[in-house]
Each structure stands twice: as structure tokens, then as C-alpha cells.
Image (tube, helix red, strand yellow):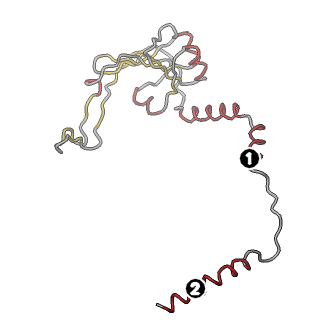
Amino acid sequence: MKYRAALSLILIALLPGVCVAAQRIGQTYEVIEVDPVAYIKKRSVDFDYAAYQKQKVAQSINALRAQPLPRTQASEINYHRVMHTVERDVIDANGNVIYPTGYEYNALDYVTWSFRVFVLDEEDIARFSSEIQPHDVVLINQGRIFEAQKALNMPVYVIDTKTQAALKVSTVPSIVSQSGNQLKIEAIHYE
């Protein structure tokens, strides 16, 4: 115990001298660096953020787009049952299986649509603007989404591959609505 205490006292006495001697080893040079804040300010003045943001938004919207749908050649009406398959057991609070894996049901037996879905190109907006109600959903196949939003004064969305497949839309313009417990897909041809 005395040995440890003595060793500790010696180290405490020697450390300040060792630290002073270790402060400078070899030749030193002034470091000349650009002030990071000044550099960021200079770069931000030169940067066109509005153009960058517009480009990024356009890129992200185009990344979501599905393969463009063809134009409707002849008007027709098709019907589609929206069947859903349960991917894993649905259990209640007591652990009892309510719906087993693989159970199929028609979603429209339980849900009622109070809206229609318009699948359009930008060129169709003027033709259908009087038919579109505020509670309807507009999906754009091709065209400029922001111009369509301005023309309709409502949100407009890009149709993606999953939505296109779920609605069974194959041409534009089309109007999808609920008819009983199935979807009614009305492909419209006009000159």
C-alpha cells in the first residue's frame, strides 16, 4: 500500500514536466483553411435552389410513373371484382384466428366508394374538368402534374404501376367508379 502511494506521488510530481516538454515536437506550420461558414455563404449565393428543387421534384414524379397507358380507341365498360388475399393469420385479442392465411374476400363488400377515379393525360383535363367533382380523385398518366393541379384547382396524383394494376385500367381516359360490389372501368374515346 505504501509502495502504491509513493509511486502515485512521484507520477503526480513528474507529469507537469512531461506535459510541458510534450507540447511542441518538431517544426510547426500555420494552418491556412477557408472559414467553413464563409465558404458555405459564398456557395449558397451562387446556388440556384429554385432550379435544383424543380429538377428534383420532376425526377421524383417521373420515377413514380408507370409505363404510359395507350389512348382509348373505342369506348367500352368493364367490371372488376376487387379480391384481396389475407397474407397472414388475422387474430383477435384472445389469440383466436379470425381470418386464416389465404382467405379471399371482396373489399367492396365492406367499403363503399363515394368518389370516382379519373385516369387522364394532361390533354384530357379541359375535356373532363366540368365532370370532376371536388371529392373525385384525378390520376395523371402523362403530362405536367402541377399544371393539371392549377387547371382543376385540386390535388392531382401520378398513376403508379400498383394503382394501375389494382384498378385494372388499361387505357386513358378512363373513369373508375363502384357499381355494387365491383369496380366499373369506363374507357372513353372522344375526338
- Measured in 3D between alpha carbons, the distance from the residue under mark 1 to the one under mark 2, in whole angstroms, is 47 Å
Q: How many marks?
A: 2
Q: Compared to 98, does 180 lie above or below? A: above
Name the mark on residue 9: 2
Q: Position of residue 114 (x, y in %)?
A: 35, 16
* SS at badge 2: helix
The tag earlier along the polypeptide, 1 or 2, is 2
Amino acid marked by disc 1: Val
Which image quadrant is residue 95 in? top left
Label 1 crowd bin: few (<14), some (14–19), many (20+), radius 10 Å: few
Q: Horizontally, is 14 left or right of 33 in the view?
A: left
Q: Nearer the viewer, residue 36 or 88?
A: 36
Name the mark on residue 37: 1
Task: Residue at 52% x, 10% y: name it.
Answer: 129
Q: Horizontally, is 134 left or right of 94 in the view?
A: right
Q: Compared to 21, does 47 lie above or below? A: above
Task: Residue at 44% x, 24% y: name it.
Answer: 169
Task: Residue at 44% x, 33% y: name it.
Answer: 162
Q: Compared to 53, does 72 lie above or below? A: above
Q: Position of residue 117 (x, y in %)?
A: 43, 19
Label 2 crowd bin: few (<14), some (14–19), many (20+), radius 10 Å: few
Q: Position of residue 149 (x, y in %)?
A: 56, 19
Name the mark on residue 190: none
Q: Horizontally, is 60 left or right of 187 in the view?
A: right
Q: Nearer the viewer, residue 95 or 77?
A: 95
Task: Residue at 77% x, 77% y: name it.
Answer: 25
Q: Horizontally, is 73 left or right of 167 in the view?
A: right
Amino acid marked by disc 2: Leu
Label pair 1/2, CB-CB below 8 angstroms? no
Closer mark to the observer between disc 1 and disc 2: 2
Q: Quadrant of the C terminus?
A: top right
Q: Position of residue 7 (x, y in %)?
A: 56, 89
